[in-house]
Amino acid sequence: MDKFVTLEEIDQTAQAVRSRLEAIPRAGLILGSGLGSLADAAEGATVIPYSQLPNWPVSTVPGHEGRLVLGKLQGQPVLMLQGRVHYYEGYSMSQVVLPVRVMQRLGIQCLIVTNAAGAVNPDFEPGDLMIITDHLNLVGMAGENPLRGPNLDELGPRFLDMSRPYDPQLMELARQVAGEHDLHLHKGVYAYLAGPSFESPAEYRYLRGIGVDSVGMSTVPEVITARHGGMRVLGISTISNKANLDGNTVTTHEVPRLTTLVKGVVQRL
């Protein structure tokens, strides 16, 4: 039976975090596979292992440190998740998105979510950055939507409009920062699959045929939950591997840093 996180549990976790905050963060950041080093740039950081927070799901995946980092980035107070949990780890969708619910209860209004993703678009190369302009929730379309179950009316509506999941102003801000630092920035559609197995060649061909540019095993439930609570969202994929169309491509989670881009966006919030 699914575990549906209650508002009381969310508020219990939020209070545990709030007691360690010096100021309401300007943004929440979720750092994906191999991207946790960005948290090391936080100034005056308070680090809380997930295991010390009530109700918080603990990551079991290599490359996800499993720590909450409170501090300043470019002078702005931020809350950073150094690693996330995934549906394939055995958590319910409600548990997967609990960190976003906590951000909402803390009053955070902007979410920057990052991931390491496989390239489906043949023009993408490992190490490239892609702004997520839209997504395909292939897991949620099959029933496992993070809003399934009792609706938390205090946090958002029963039926959520998803016509604009990613914030146009934040996307434009990211493009400006990328231009100033000579960072090549793709834009495209991200597909969410459950994992943990990577995609077969036939699945990659299918994804390309329906207009997907990158694919991964996270992010979309967090984005839906953030939008449910009225948060503005910026999504960024770091391309970790080329499409495995012929069965010969090796997949890896070794990815470069997003530090320059994310720092520039946070600075201008």
Image (spheres, rainbow, N blue to C red):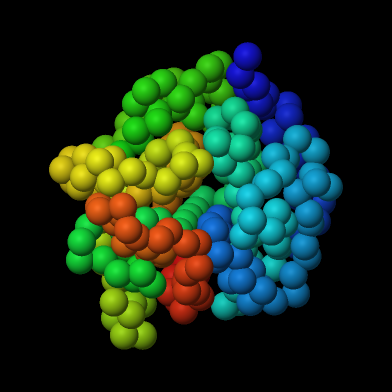
Measuring 45% from the left and 36% from the top, which residue is drawn there?
194
Q: Nearer the viewer, residue 126 or 261?
A: 126
Q: Is residue 242 above or below residue 229?
A: below
Quadrant where the N terminus sits is top right
Asked if one can make out residue 73 in the rendered structure from this viewpoint, the answer is: yes
Measuring 59% from the left and 71% from the top, which residue is drawn there?
38
Q: Nearer the viewer, residue 87 or 206?
A: 206
Picture coordinates of residue 85, whole percent (x, y):
61, 44
Picture coordinates of residue 46, whole percent (x, y):
78, 65
**163 horizontally vs 110: left or right:** left
Picture coordinates of residue 118, whole percent (x, y):
36, 56
Picture coordinates of residue 75, whole percent (x, y):
61, 76
**60 horizontally vs 96: left or right:** right
Q: Quadrant of residue 172?
A: bottom left
Q: Nearer the viewer, residue 8 or 186?
A: 186
Q: Is residue 97 above or below residue 240?
A: above
Measuring 71% from the left and 62% from the top, which residue is drawn there?
70
